[in-house]
Structures are given as structure tokens and as C-alpha cells.
């Protein structure tokens, strides 16, 4: 029996809906395998701004630190998205959370499911068998660099900077992951133009010498973006910086046929957070059409992280069965898509029967 305390930050838009389904699945797993999972909720993003004026209240941060792991929904709200003059934004809460908890690595698995090969806009022959992971540095780079705006509002700048230790720690973890996969790591950078990318290439090349069995290659980000569409089968583990990883992982969602299938893990030395890659999709809020699978698969990644491997496999098997039997939401099947809660209920029932 394992006792696991989980901080739950449902966030905005469809965040609460998909997170509720993930919690339902986790509760089923706990009962099925004889564990005790305790959930403690807190506000973040626009929901927190409307409540207290702060996208990451101190109480929320304390709850995250007090629990074993964090289950995150999504943040974002049109009141802020459509207001370029807003000084406080929901996304600031997520960035601050990553920084405060030192969640320096984001892991995003991308898989082409057999049952959905015909749903992708890419040809089946191109995506068949794709199973890759994007290792994205998460607390450095341009997102966290110094930001300036001139007094007249006509000049803006964002500083991109990296230190050696920031690159080394994610590079080692990426190489270790490649050693458990297909023995290949691809560094994506822009070393022909950017000094930070040249540092990434030098440091990662040095780290590569510690892993002689891993095939190590480099690609410029523009070429990598093209190769993800033309020949994604060539990739195993992709290692890259914060900005490039953000863009490439969203691009890679077309391989699986829906952004609603992509889970992620944000890892640090002490804390870990698990969240679907998709945003708040605010226009779908309350309509029961949001795909809960990314949130549910994020819960599976959470269980893997705490070494509950059989439990994680049970969730993954149930999701596979839902896909095979076409118990999916409308983003995957526009004509016969099922409501969010029906997809969650099916996965729960499969787990109970395993």
C-alpha cells in the first residue's frame, strides 16, 4: 500500500473538467491496487487572479510544497489573452510555479497510436511506429530572461541566457532516457546564429562522451521542425531549450492526431508536476467536449514517477482500449465523439476489469 498526497491545481477553462476525469481514474487505481491517494486543491491562473489578484497565491505554493506530487490542469482566459495591456496574466502563475519549485525539465512523450493513424493529417506511412520524447529545459532561456520595454513603447527586448549547469542537468537526464529507449539523442538548437545555442552544443557534446552507446546528433531548429513532419520516425529523444521545446512539442501533436492526447511531466530535484500539454481551450468550457486523455495519461506519468509502474500501465492500457474502441471525444471523432465524462467513465471501467 502506498500513501500519496497530490496537490491539485485545476486552473482555468477545460482544466477543471479534464482534471476531474484524471482524479476519477486515480481514485479507481487507488481502490483497485490498495493505495490511498489524498487530493488537496488550490487555485492558480485566472481563477486565482479573480479570487485574490495573484496568479500564484502563496497558499497555492505552500500546498504544492506540502504534497508529494502536483496534478495540474490548464491556465488561460480570454480576458487576458485579448488584452495586450494586462500587467498580470494567468501564465505568470505557471512560470512562477516552475521557477519556485525548480521544475527545470519538461518531458513530453509523443506517440502515434495504431487506432488513430488515419486521424493524423500526416500520412500513415510517415507516422506509423512513432514513439519519441521531447526533453525541454523549463526554467531558463528567453521566457525567464530580463524583459524591457522603452518608455515610448516602441522598443522591446527579451534576454535569452543559459548557464552551464542548467544545460548539463537536463542533458544527463535526456541521455539516460535515450539509454532506455532507442539509444539515440538529437540536440535541437540554432548554433549557427545564437551564442546560447553554441553553448548548448558545446556542453551537450561534452556530456555525450559519458554515454558512448548513445547515437548523438544535432539539428538546427528550423530543420528539426521540418523533419518532425517529414520523417518523425527518425527521432527517439529530442533535447532542446525552453522556447524551441515549447514550439516543437506543440507541432509534434499533429503526429498523434490531437493535442488532447499529449501528457507531460515537469521534474525538479525535489518536486514534480504533471499536466496535459494542451491549453485552457476556453471556448469549450462547460460543453463536455474536452479530451481528458492527456490529463489521464499525465496521471499515469505521475504514477511512473513514484514507481507505481503496474498502476501506470493499467491506465495506459485502458486509454489504448478506449482509442481502439473509438470511445473518444470530438477532437478525434468529430461525428461520433463522446462527452468528456463518458470517456473517463469508460477508462475507469476498463481499469476495474483488468
Image: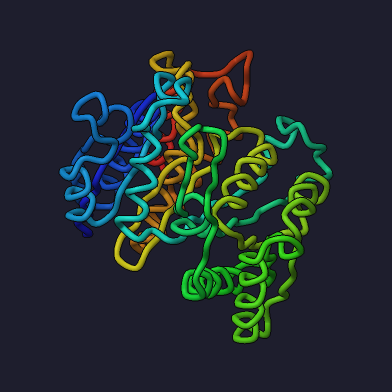
Res. 85 image quadrant? top left
Measured from the top left, where is residue 183 in percent x and y?
67, 72
Query: Which of the pair 171/87 is nearer the observer?
Result: 87
- Give the total number of marks visible in the rendering: 0
Q: Residue lying farthest front?
A: 152
- Quadrant showing the N terminus: bottom left
Q: Is residue 123 above or below residue 233?
A: above
Query: Which of the pair 6/134 is nearer the observer?
Result: 134
Q: Residue at x 43, y 17 (%)?
A: 288
- Quadrant showing the C terminus: top left
Measured from the top left, where is residue 187 in percent x and y?
67, 65
Left or right: residue 314 versus residue 238 is: left
Measured from the top left, where is residue 323 in percent x and y?
58, 34
Measured from the top left, where is residue 227 in percent x and y?
79, 51
Q: Residue at x 46, y 47 (%)?
A: 147
Task: Confirm whether residue 144 shows in the render.
Answer: yes
Query: Which of the pair 148/294 is nearer the observer?
Result: 148
Task: Confirm whether residue 345 shows in the render.
Answer: no
Q: Is residue 310 above or below residue 92?
A: below
Q: Residue at x 20, y 26 (%)?
A: 51
Res. 307 image quadrant? bottom left
Q: Residue at x 30, y 40 (%)?
A: 28
Query: Which of the pair 180/265 is nearer the observer?
Result: 265
Left or right: residue 324 versus residue 94 is: right
Amino acid at each position: 500500500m502506498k500513501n500519496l498526497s497530490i496537490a491539485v491545481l485545476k486552473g482555468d477553462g477545460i482544466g477543471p473538467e479534464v482534471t476531474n476525469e484524471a482524479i476519477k481514474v486515480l481514485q479507481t487505481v487507488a481502490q483497485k491496487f490498495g493505495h490511498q491517494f489524498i487530493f488537496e486543491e488550490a487555485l492558480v491562473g485566472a481563477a486565482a487572479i479573480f479570487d485574490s489578484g495573484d496568479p500564484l497565491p502563496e497558499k497555492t505554493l505552500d500546498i504544492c510544497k506540502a504534497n508529494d506530487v502536483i496534478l495540474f490542469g490548464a491556465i488561460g482566459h480570454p480576458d487576458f489573452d485579448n488584452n495586450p495591456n494586462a500587467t498580470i496574466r494567468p501564465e505568470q502563475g505557471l512560470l512562477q510555479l516552475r521557477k519556485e519549485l525548480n521544475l527545470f525539465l519538461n518531458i513530453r512523450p509523443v506517440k502515434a497510436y495504431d487506432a488513430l493513424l488515419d486521424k493524423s493529417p500526416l500520412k500513415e506511412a510517415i507516422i506509423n511506429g512513432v514513439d519519441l520524447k521531447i526533453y525541454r529545459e523549463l526554467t531558463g532561456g528567453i521566457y525567464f530572461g530580463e524583459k524591457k520595454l522603452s518608455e515610448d513603447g516602441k522598443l522591446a527586448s527579451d534576454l535569452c541566457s543559459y548557464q552551464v549547469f542548467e544545460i548539463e542537468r537536463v542533458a544527463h537526464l535526456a541521455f539516460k532516457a535515450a539509454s532506455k529507449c532507442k539509444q539515440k539523442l538529437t540536440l535541437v538548437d540554432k548554433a549557427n546564429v545564437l551564442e546560447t545555442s553554441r553553448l548548448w552544443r558545446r556542453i551537450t557534446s561534452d556530456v555525450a562522451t559519458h554515454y558512448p552507446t548513445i547515437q548523438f546528433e544535432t539539428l538546427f531548429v528550423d530543420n528539426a521542425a521540418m523533419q518532425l513532419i517529414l520523417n518523425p520516425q527518425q527521432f527517439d529523444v529530442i533535447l532542446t531549450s525552453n522556447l524551441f521545446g515549447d514550439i516543437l512539442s506543440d507541432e509534434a501533436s499533429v503526429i498523434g492526431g490531437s493535442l488532447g492526447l499529449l501528457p507531460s511531466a515537469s521534474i525538479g530535484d525535489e518536486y514534480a508536476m504533471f499536466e496535459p500539454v494542451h491549453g485552457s481551450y476556453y471556448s469549450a468550457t462547460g460543453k463536455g467536449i474536452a479530451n481528458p486523455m492527456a490529463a489521464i495519461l499525465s496521471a499515469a506519468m505521475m504514477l511512473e514517477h513514484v514507481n507505481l509502474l503496474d498502476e501506470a500501465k493499467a491506465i495506459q492500457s485502458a486509454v489504448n482500449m478506449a482509442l481502439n474502441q473509438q470511445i473518444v471525444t470530438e477532437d478525434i471523432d468529430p461525428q461520433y465523439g463522446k462527452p468528456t465524462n463518458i470517456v473517463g467513465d469508460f477508462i475507469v471501467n476498463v481499469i476495474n476489469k483488468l
